[in-house]
Image (cartoon, helix red, strand yellow):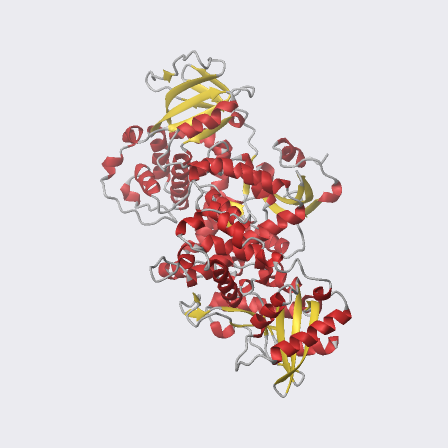
Amino acid sequence: MIDWIKNWEKVGIVGSYSNQQVQKLDGNKMILLKDMSDEDSFVDKLIYQYHDKYNDGNFQYQEIKAFLERYLTEESNNTLQIYISYDNWEQERNVVETLKSKEKKKKKKNRIENDFALFNSVYFSEVDNVTLEVEQEGINYLTSPSSGFATEEEITGTVINCSFLELKKLYNVTGTELFKSNVRNGIIDNKSLIRSVFSNYLSVDSDYNIEIEDSETIQREFKYDDYDPTLFWFSHNGITLFIDKSIAGAYDFQNDSITINPKACSVINGAQTITNFFLVYSELRHDLQKKDYQDALDQLETLLSKIFVKLTIISGKGEYAPFITKGLNTQNPITQEDFVAISKEVIEINKLARGYFYILKSGEVKRVGGLTPLQFVKQYFIVQSKPGSGKNFNKKDLEKQIKDFHKDLSHKSEEERRDVLEKMTLLTTIEDWWNKNNAGKSTKKGVVENYGKNYFQSFVLDNYSSFIDNDDELASIFEKFKELLEPEDLNYNEFKKDDLYEKKLRGYFEKNTVEATSENNISDTDEQRKYEEKLCAFLSAIDKQRIHYRTEILKFNESENIMVDNPRIIRRNNGEVLENFHLPTRSFKELYEKLNIEEKLKKGDEDLIEDDFPKFEKSTLYKELEKKYNIIILDFEDNKLSKVVLKKDFDLQLLKKYESEVKQSYQKTIAAFIEGDKSSFPKANKDTKVHVRPKALRKDDSFMFTSGEMLTKRTFWVTRYYLNELLDEKR
């Protein structure tokens, strides 16, 4: 048994392991546990020990971030969980506040807070129970009445007056674990009214001229006297603490003190209050310590002892906790979505959807792919080819629907589940296109444009998910979509049901290809040659000055009942490739869509760092370059089509031969975003394999660049020079 690991086994972070799984990165201070069993999957766990003897005063924040950066570049299907140990909450906050004090820019301070919000904090306090002193000049308390329904052995309640100084004893050994049964974590917001109010209650002697570090300037509308500590009790609803009495030594109330087992209790009402109150306290305390204002520090502790809150302690069977939680309210109202977000079904869905999306609960740090429970349900309906059900979904059924979709997702095979999850990630691309082309209801538009978004999303995913690589394709698919619907006598109510979709649209592409004969499936060399010759004749006969070859080829394949999945066109004239080869727009779009550039510029907070962008090995660009394509080469002689060549499962081979060069182009693109210099995007030349250039349906199809300029949408392209080289090799 490794001595240091005993503590982590006790708190359930480490289970069974072998010596091969343990990698010491810095003695016993930083340890990586590889391939730890996590139900039906595996995770890697980084443990950083900062409690007790491991606290040498040097918290290795940059080293943790550097490790995370290296980890993200590795090829691994595992997720990484980071656990940091402290003696208590005060020690953790001292680390955070010290790191923040070294930064001048608010953005960097906030980034530190966000990082620590995503780390898992573990407190190795030797305290088995906490005693709260509640007597104050003959305290009166209120006990719950006997109902005759639930006996005292099952549940009891007591309302007492408790100071924040006493509450700090409990919070100091639990931190956010105190909210484990709450519907949400305490929501942290530097601009919130609640923090402004708390800062006023905690204001010390004005002679010290203290402002809370990392906070907005407080606009005080009232005198300090209005925030007399004695008034807090009257202006606050109180805090509710649930204690699971099945745990040994959970709770004991004797005379003027309450003894509580920290492992047995959870705040089920008041998480916001506790979180923000003590964050204001920790910021102010750190600032006073830094300035060595000892008298003010003493005043601050005295203030904590004078600010009382109504504390309701409910001791009962754990099964009562969810019901009681639902019956309570806070100063920020709780919705049904908040309760659903902490259900076991959502927890398990998040495990299944790891790497694709994440269902958030209120107060969690927003992340890429984050969805509300309601958004998840609506999107899942669309992916399941039930767009009407998604559009007409009643929120009151949210809990039941989450359970149904959890059951559906968990019972799918791994391949089926991956298909669903990948389709859900494509919904944003389709919705963006729709919003740019059909958003906003108008009498000038038809019923389809006004009400058909959900239907269109399902239609694309159901029939053409592998074809989505640019706006042109979506525009072409939309025309087919309208063509199929417009003969119908439509009204908006049709789009609230699934009947029309089942009748006209579901499986359209499959229905029109499934009957293809072996002759038309191009299963051997002779059949492929016949297909190439017939397609060449078809294209040569088209009497148009300008031909959109891909659209015409799709029409030809459909008319001939031929299945060529997602064909890409390469034109050559006299043996030379004419155009660069564009990669899907989502490969570039992911670099800016989550940055909120406009908001950053408004605030003057536009600084970006490399960590704001996906690592190359985890990027959409990398994933797209791993794919193989069905390529149709159109060979021209003196600008006249002479030959068509089909290359199935064509590999661009960029990651096999030139990964470092492609990565360099990717890093150069990120640098251009950071500097706000569009001229720094990698350009097409004979020495560049991948470059950046515009790719948009219209000139006004644009995005806001980090310089504040609106740029035409761009994507990554493979240079025609490289394609020439590659195709010559494959002749």
* Location of residue 674 with respect to 132 vertically, above or below: below
Left or right: residue 155 compared with residue 51 = left
| Along the viewing direction, whichever of 702 and 604 lies nearer the viewer | 702
Q: Residue at x 70, y 70 (%)?
A: 647
Q: Residue at x 46, y 43 (%)?
A: 374
* Location of residue 324 with respect to 715 vertically, above or below: above
**The quarter of the displayed image where residue 447 is located:** bottom left
Left or right: residue 611 compared with residue 538 = left
| Along the viewing direction, whichever of 564 and 678 lies nearer the viewer | 564
Residue 499 percent across, percent down from the top left: 50, 47
* Quadrant containing the N terminus in the rendered view: top right
Whether residue 309 can be seen here:
yes
Left or right: residue 583 compared with residue 709 = right
Whether residue 78 can be seen here:
no
Residue 31 percent across, percent down from the top left: 65, 44
Residue 538 percent across, percent down from the top left: 62, 76
